[in-house]
Image: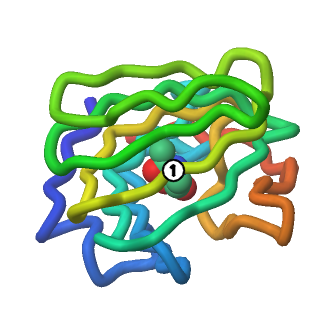
């Protein structure tokens, strides 16, 4: 079993990755061997984040805050607590946070930990062997 607490085990450690428009707290990473990574992400109020995950699929569930999701060439969806979306076709999109927006995110393949968005809003595909967890 893996048991972690945000304040005790994630925040302020290498599992917390800060980007210009968000902070990503990564509870599960590739070397946890689950086959996906799990992140508690806070997008900062007043920001817009361009995203294009060429190498990953992502499921997202909003638990706090208000904002908008715009699919390139497609609709704009309001984001509020209870909104779920899955980036199942590598769609280019933009996330706009009206207030701080807290999102629970699952990535497959799992992130290894240190990835930050490149200029296109993608994460690189990094190789790392899973290790057994005690
Ligand atoms: C949905 C979202 O917050 N995307 C941007 C960052 C990503 N969730 C991450 O790296 O945690």
Q: Residue 17, position in %: x, y?
A: 49, 74
Compared to residue 34, the image places residue 9 above or below, namely below
Left or right for 125, reference 66: right
- Of 113 and 42, nearer the camera is 42
Count how many numbered circles sit on residues in the image.
1
Residue placed most toward the observer, 124 or 5: 124
Q: Quadrant of the C terminus?
A: top left
Q: How is the image coloured?
A: rainbow
Q: In the picture, residue 89 is in which quadrant?
A: top right
Q: Which residue does the image show at 17% across and 38% down from the upper left?
A: 63
In the figure, 44 relative to 63: above or below?
Answer: below
Q: Please report the residue visible at 49 percent of the width from the left and 39 percent of the height from the top.
A: 69
User: Residue at coordinates 13% horizontally, 69% vertically from top-left?
Assistant: 8
Q: Find disc 1 in the rendering and name its residue.
A: 95
Q: Quadrant of residue 100?
A: bottom left
**Which quarter of the rendered picture does the N terminus lie within?**
top left
Residue density around tag 1, few if under 14, some if 14–19, many if 20 or more, within 10 Å = many
Residue for point 50% across, 25% down? 59
Q: Is mark 1 within 8 Å of ligand 1?
A: yes
Q: Return the x and y of residue 123 as percentages of the image width and height.
A: 77, 55
Disc 1 is placed on an element classified as strand
**In the rendered image of this protein, does residue 8 appear above or below residue 134?**
below
Q: Is residue 73 left or right of residue 31?
A: right
In this view, the residue in front, 111 or 131, is 111
Q: Position of residue 18 (x, y in %)?
A: 47, 79
Front-most of residues 22 and 16: 22
């Amino acid at each position: 079993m893996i048991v972690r607490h945000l304040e005790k085990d994630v925040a302020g450690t290498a599992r917390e990755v800060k980007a210009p428009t968000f902070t990503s707290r990564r509870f599960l990473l590739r070397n946890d061997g689950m086959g996906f990574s799990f992140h508690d992400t806070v997008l900062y109020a007043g920001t817009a984040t361009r995203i294009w995950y060429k190498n990953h699929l992502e499921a997202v569930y909003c638990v706090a805050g208000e904002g908008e999701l715009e699919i390139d060439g497609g609709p704009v969806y309001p984001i509020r607590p209870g909104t779920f979306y899955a980036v199942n076709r590598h769609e280019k999109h933009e996330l706009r946070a009206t207030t701080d927006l807290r999102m629970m995110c699952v990535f497959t393949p799992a992130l290894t930990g240190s990835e930050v968005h490149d200029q296109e809003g993608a994460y690189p595909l990094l190789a790392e062997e899973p290790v057994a967890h005690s």
